[in-house]
Image (cartoon, rainbow, N blue to C red):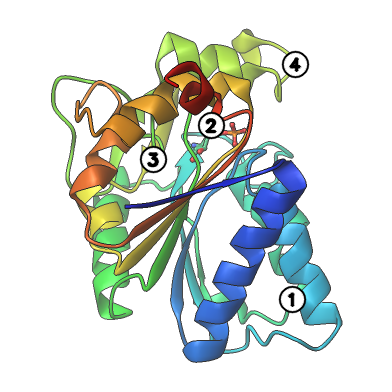
Amino acid sequence: MNFITVKDYASMSAFAARFVLEQIRSKPDSVLGLPTGSTPVGMYQLLVNAYKRGEADFSKIITFNLDEYYNLPKEHEQSYYSFMYRNLFSHINIQPENVHIPDGNAINLEKECTAYDQAIKSAGCIDLQVLGTGVNGHIGFNEPAEHLIKGTHITALTKQTLKSNSVNFGCTEQMPTNAITMGMGSIFSARKILMLASGKNKSQVMSLLYKGQITTYAPLTLLALHHDVTVVMDEAAAGFLCKSK
Ligand code: GLP
């Protein structure tokens, strides 16, 4: 794994945007795996800026989002569908049919999960998967557990995730308690992974990844087993490095 520490959120976002742009330029029909959350917002902004300056073409790009809340209307401002259109898709020349976000409102959820993994395979698998992490080490919505699941599936959110993400919903009561997420196998089938981490609250879990302490109770630590992972952290997220000196 390649660990890179940069000064702050802005530098992390700039690094991530350059990384994605390089991917798009070297393979204009790249398949990208995309995250939500506050971490990638700066990167998305820079990608939009690059597109507006005529420096990026998304016309052949295919995307697969990691996850979506269960039973939350697509139009809800906190759905990941809304998030992605608000932060990226509405501002670039991506073809709507090339955008994939798991449907947490599907009538047959089991079928939706199988179809999602099949669609990833049919697209030729993910070239570059961008990831953030929860403070508990979840990736997508693969929550800490004794066993992790390979394919796209429905999952219950942990108390910790409900607490962290409820800030966006105003209160925990309004937050969906379940989600649909790509599984660890779907994520690991990506040829290349870019992991982003910003802020002091990510430092503890990032230290586990750095030390190679693999545990299903912090799913991001499994990234140590993937052959091509770049981790970019800001100084706050990399705070554990100073403590261990
Ligand atoms: C959500 C998403 C994750 C994301 C995490 C981190 O839970 N399901 O994919 O990595 O949020 O959020 P933030 O970037 O806001 O810390």
Is tag 1's residue or tag 4's residue first in the polypeptide sequence?
1
Taking depth in this image into account, of 147 and 40 the one nearest to the observer is 40
Is tag 3's residue or tag 2's residue first in the polypeptide sequence?
3
Is tag 2's residue or tag 1's residue first in the polypeptide sequence?
1
Q: Is residue 56 visible?
A: yes
Examine the image and state in which quarter residue 230 appears: bottom left
Is tag 4's residue or tag 2's residue first in the polypeptide sequence?
4
Is tag 3's residue or tag 4's residue first in the polypeptide sequence?
4
Q: Is mark 1 within 8 Å of ligand 1?
A: no
Q: Is mark 2 within 8 Å of ligand 1?
A: no
Label 3, on which residue? 180
Element at label 3: strand
Q: Which quarter is ligand 1 in?
A: top right
Q: Nearer the viewer, mark 1 or mark 4?
A: 1
> What is the spatial separation of the Cα atoms under label 3 and label 2, in whole angstroms?
30 Å
Q: Position of residue 117 (x, y in %)?
A: 26, 61
Q: Is residue 86 above or below residue 223?
A: below
Label 2, on which residue? 238
Q: Is residue 196 above or below residue 18?
A: above
Work out which quarter of the rendered image holds the C terminus and state it.
top left
Label 1, on which residue? 92
